[in-house]
Structures are given as C-alpha cells and as structure tokens.
Image (cartoon, grey):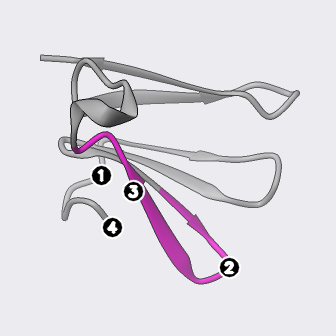
Amino acid sequence: MVSDAALSVASGVDGAVWIGTPNGVSRYRDGRFQNFGRGASDGFTSSWIERIFVARDGDVYFFGSR
C-alpha cells in the first residue's frame, strides 16, 4: 500500500478495493497493490485522498484536499 494510513476505503465493481491515503490511492486486487498519486504524473493535484466514490458503471472518483 502507498501509505500506512487509510483515510477512505471503497469497493470497486470489479472486486477491487480502493484505499485513499495521505500519499495517494492504492488499488488492491488479486493479491496485489497498484499505487497512484504519488507524483503529478498521475494527474493528481493533491495526494491526500479523503473520499472515494465508485459509480455503478465502474468509474472511480477521488476527493482530496491540502
């Protein structure tokens, strides 16, 4: 996981678990973590992810601050 602290957790429609942290987002699926948001290259304006919303169609929305 990208951080030791979790600020939010959401279940994806594909069975993945999305975890919002102070250092970006981790996606856990099939026993592996995939990390996003540690650098501006992922398009995040803030790495502090406070809320995650998963839409019925599978789109994932992140809400952060700082």
**Overall secondary structure of the magenta stretch?**
strand
Q: Secondary structure at mark 1?
A: loop
Residue at left offset 71%, top offset 47%: 12
Magenta highlight on residue 36: yes
Front disc: 4 or 3: 3
Give the spatial CA distance, label 1 vs label 2. Answer: 19 Å
Amino acid type for the residue under numbered disc 4: Met
Q: Earlier in the sequence, mark 1 or mark 4?
A: 4
Secondary structure category for the residue under label 3: strand
The residue under label 2 is which amino acid type?
Answer: Asp
Residue at 87% across, 28% down: 57
Q: Which mark sits nearer the N-terminus, 3 or 1?
A: 1
For the residues bearing labels 4 and 3, Cβ distance under 8 angstroms: yes
Disc 4 residue crowd, few under 14, some 14–19, many 20+, Cα 10 Å: some
In this rendering, the answer to whether 20 lies above or below 60 is below
Q: Is residue 66 left or right of residue 46?
A: left
Q: x, y percentage for residue 23?
A: 19, 45
In 3D space, how far apart are the residues under numbered discs 1 and 4 (Cα atoms)?
9 Å
Mark 3 to mark 2: distance in Å?
14 Å
Q: In the rendered structure, find residue 30 and report the number of the disc placed on it.
A: 2
Amino acid type, mark 1: Ala
Which segment did they paint magenta? 27-38
- Is 6 drawn above or below residue 2 in the view shown? above
Q: Which mark is residue 27?
A: none
Q: Which residue is mark 3?
A: 35
The image position of residue 18, as x and y in percent, is 53, 50
Which residue is painted at 30% across and 20% down in the image?
64
